[in-house]
Amino acid sequence: MNNHGANHAASEVKQRRVWPWVLLGIFAVLLALGVALGMVGYRFYRQAMEVKTHETAAFESVKKAKDITKTLDSTSLDEALPSMKEHTAKAREITHGDLWNIMAKLPKYGDDIRTVQGMTEVMDDLATKTLPSLSGSLNTLMSSKLSDGEGQVNMQPIYDIQKTFDNTNTQIQQEYEKLKDLTTPHINKVKQAYEQGLEQFSGLAEKLNQNNKLLQILPQFMGNDGQRTYLIMANTTSETRSIGGLIGSLGSMTTDNGKVQVGDFHPNTEFLPTTIGTDSEHAVFDEPLAFSFDIRDQSAIVDYETVAKNLTSFWQGSKYSSNVDGVMAIDPVFIQELVKMTGDVQVPNGPLLTGDNTAEFLLNGIYKDVYIANQDWYFEYVASHVMNALFENLDVKKLMQLSDITTPMAEGRHLYFTSFHEDENQSFKDMGLSKGAPSSEENPEVGVYLNQQNASKLDWYLHRNTTVTRTSCNEDGSQTYHVSFTMQNDLPDEDYANLSWYVVGGNGQAAAGVRGQATEKMLFYAPAGGSIANFQVSGSGKGSVPQATTMDGRDMYSALAYIGKGQNLTYEFDVTTSPKATTDLKFDQTPMGWTDLGVTYDTKSCSIDK
């Protein structure tokens, strides 16, 4: 991997364990209360220390199981549960004794004591209700054989645990809601411990919820109710389009009673010259190089469900026409994640692709080392290989690994899926797999989407970094943030000098045809119910100030950015959320060729209080 790939990999956000912060957070709460309420007496102090001792022991007993959502080690969990139950029960008993109940009625500091009581309740419920139920489901699933090794998946074990797992998930979500509903503590250290515990518990709740959704819809997806046919759209983010990249090929996958078969991929040339595009889409992309909105340009549309429907029309208008039950979109970053799961891929007369170099090869190396006529075949070979390998020997570990990568891949827009069975599609939406433009007032996002206008593969070299800084929490409940979005063209001199226009651009296409110059049609979307203001543009490149327009019924802003070799360009603007916002603003963008989103958040200026 080259330096920029290594830097991105090194900067990935590290996963933190759930248990240490939840339990140690309670310790910090107790110690802080012991100091703040020291006048109450030695008895309370001793009880607080006793609770600390029990929670420490509970933490030590469960530490062997580590993060159950990753290890799925039901044996370690079973061994840890008896000791954990004993200690959480005693901690709960102490904090709900007469002394604590009396102190919970004190002005101001009583809130903090009630928060401690609530936290010990949640931990005890977790130990006595949720984790034993989860362990039972895991034992059932781990002892089952899901695959015959030839692509046939046995769905019966999934059916067997669906109800139990769903009930377990309901319990953990209720416990999480109970934790969220506790009064925010007054003492700063208590507040910090509570917020850390809340954050970490949310990770456990989110992970179990994700796993549950996968288990609930998997049998239908796998064709247990009859054969399903899914389209697979392969795109390259080296030539960006709003929600991905230029669409290189379209393939299919069938599932029938657990049997999976990945079909051939067909290059985009087989679906030309048909076009599908609305008047407003053409109006936005009318300069400097108008998109034709043939199959290659469909992912310039920000709403994935619309893209999926359009791709289905292309497919059904071709010689491959068939019924379509849903559409999946994948890119080389997602394929690299599958390579990590299924094993290295030796490309015939090509390199050995691993979990570290697959994306780089498919997004850059292939254009340097493989004739243009053979590039689609290489991509199709790798994609087909890993998709088939995923289901050939499907086991619980692989199934949960797939669940683990689904959220980050969906958030980074490297993976999409929409089902045309409406009763199932909501689950895929809830998993973030059918993303469109920002649409939630409660969970606000601001979107910035790029579309390469200089026919090339220059977006591999275009690095982006973004900072999102909260500047105020407003009286009406909204929040205001300052966003700084920077693009840097790191095209090396060697590639600039030696590679063809196919990679570095400059094919004589009027204003877009400048060698080595990334020419981006930029789309800016405000949060639902919110606004964008105060655009400023700076840097060694050239960029227009975004102008208000509409596309497909949505208000947005459009701009053109020109970033030559070695140049950079920064767009700064202010974002105000809806007054209904209950979470911090998130930054949504066109995917890059790596997993690091390049986004830094600073929300310390004030806190959302809903």
Image: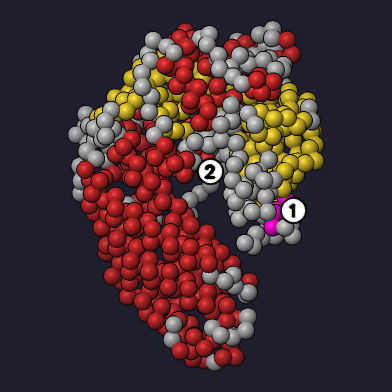
In the rendered image, the vertical position of residue 369 relative to residue 69, given as above or below: above
Of marks 1 and 2, which one's residue comes earlier in the chain?
2
Pointer 2 residue: 12
Which secondary structure is most common in the magenta stretch? strand
Query: Circle 1 is placed at which residue position?
Result: 471
Q: Secondary structure at mark 1?
A: strand
Residues 130 and 293: in front is 293
The disc label shown at residue 73, or none? none
> Which residue appears at 45% of the width and 77% of the height?
52
Residue 295's spot in the image, x, y percent?
A: 52, 17
Magenta range is: 477-481
Where is residue 184? Give x, y as percent. Answer: 59, 70
Whole-Å distance between the Cαs marked 1 and 2?
A: 26 Å
Residue at position x 44%, y 13% from top? 317
Q: Label 2 sits on what residue type?
A: Glu
| Front position in the image: 224 or 518 | 224
Residue 605 shows in the view: no
Task: Identify the image quadrant of the C terminus.
Answer: bottom right
- The answer to whether residue 515 is magenta is no
